Image: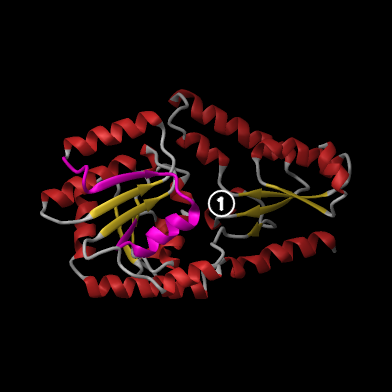
């Protein structure tokens, strides 16, 4: 709080929910202009937390919502998902978390080339069961069972316990030579692998928070010309199916996931077209430059 006041900022913009009380004090005690940037619905996050006892999730979510109602009035609200707008006042600003297109990424997309003649399937992000970790292993098993030659790389931080479980399952499927757990990589190194991939996977489980927010990795895959295999969430449909940049499947039905993946792999010309359509969609619509204007409007409204 003291550090914040010492900056003598014209606007205080924060996004961590634990700072709500600080935002309240800045707004009502010190008369500052404050923005609460709500990246994801915390109430939906709480309901989706696997480490919380099931009986406690709803009461905690209700308690947090009451905290919001008590302390955020008077603060400007920035929402990252249109699926959260019904939860907040209509005066909120919608600033979606679309990717920033850099020269390095444009170069990767323009120089896009296949890793090899063997299809490469990639996932980038936090590795967790709720984010599809075991689904990727089972998908690899189905593809191998059906005679496909492929490589799969799973990139991102993973707990030791889940890492061991994944390795055991991969060994049971005898896929140690095909499925690689990369761990965390430098972001540009990860994007370079995505640019070489045949398919980018995003098979998150259907929990409330994921079903009401956009996984930005979908747009990162599209931005680099990599066709997307994604969970069949309604809030993702416009991006994947609407732009014809990939296919969707129910992540809880592995045969459906494998069928969609097979369909993509069996049509290399359509895969290439999906990649091109994804690049064009992100460059023309789904990038940070389109959202920056709304954020600047929010700042301008507060200052004036």
Q: Residue 179: within the magenta?
A: yes
Q: Which region is colored magenta?
A: 174-200
In the shown orientation, is residue 151 left or right of residue 23? left
Q: Quadrant of the N terminus?
A: top right
Please say if 228 is above or below 88. Answer: below
* Residue 129 visible in the current orientation: yes
* Residue 214 visible in the current orientation: no
**Residue bearing mark 1:** 84
Please say if 62 is above or below 287. Answer: above
Q: Residues within 10 Å of mark 1 (few under 14, many from 20)?
A: some
Residue nearest the viewer, comparing 180 with 134 = 180
Q: Residue at x 31, y 31 (%)?
A: 164
- Residue 240: image quadrant is bottom left
Residue 267 percent location from the top left of the image: 20, 70
Helix, strand or loop at mark 1: helix
What is the count of numbered marks? 1
Q: Quadrant of the C terminus?
A: bottom right
Q: Residue 83: within the magenta?
A: no
Residue 191 percent location from the top left of the image: 44, 59
Q: Residue at x 67, y 56 (%)?
A: 92
Q: Residue at x 65, y 34 (%)?
A: 66
Its colouring scheme is: secondary structure
Residue 64 percent location from the top left of the image: 62, 33
Residue nearest the viewer, comparing 250 with 111 = 111
Please say if 96 is above or below 66. Answer: below
Q: Residue at x 11, y 48 (%)?
A: 145
In the shown orientation, is residue 125 left or right of residue 247? right
Residue 148 percent location from the top left of the image: 14, 56
């Amino acid at each position: 709080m003291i550090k914040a006041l010492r900056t003598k900022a014209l606007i205080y913009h924060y996004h961590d929910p634990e700072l709500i009380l600080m935002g309240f004090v800045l707004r009502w005690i010190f008369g500052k202009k404050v923005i609460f940037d709500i990246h994801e619905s915390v109430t939906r996050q709480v309901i989706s937390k696997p480490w919380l006892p099931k009986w406690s999730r709803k009461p905690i979510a209700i308690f947090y919502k009451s905290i919001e109602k008590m302390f955020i009035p008077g603060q400007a609200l920035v929402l990252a998902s249109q699926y959260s707008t019904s939860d907040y006042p209509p005066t909120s600003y919608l600033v979606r978390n679309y990717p920033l297109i850099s020269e390095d990424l444009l170069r990767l997309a323009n120089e896009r080339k296949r890793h090899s003649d063997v299809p490469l399937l990639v996932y980038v992000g936090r590795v967790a069961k709720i984010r599809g970790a075991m689904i990727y292993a089972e998908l690899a098993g189905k593809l191998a069972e059906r005679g496909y030659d492929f490589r799969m790389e799973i990139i991102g931080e993973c707990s030791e316990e889940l890492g061991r479980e994944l390795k055991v399952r991969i060994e049971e499927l005898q896929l140690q030579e095909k499925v690689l757990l990369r761990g965390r990589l430098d972001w540009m190194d990860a994007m370079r692998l995505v640019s070489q991939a045949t398919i980018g996977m995003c098979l998150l489980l259907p929990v409330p928070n994921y079903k009401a927010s956009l996984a930005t990795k979908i747009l990162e895959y599209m931005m680099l010309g990599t066709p997307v295999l994604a969970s069949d969430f309604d809030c993702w449909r416009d991006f994947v199916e609407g732009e014809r940049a990939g296919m969707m499947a129910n992540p809880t039905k592995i045969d459906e996931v494998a069928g969609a993946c097979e369909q993509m792999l069996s049509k290399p010309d359509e895969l290439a077209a999906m990649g091109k359509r994804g690049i064009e969609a992100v460059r023309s619509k789904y990038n940070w430059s389109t959202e920056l204007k709304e954020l600047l409007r929010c700042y301008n409204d507060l200052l004036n």
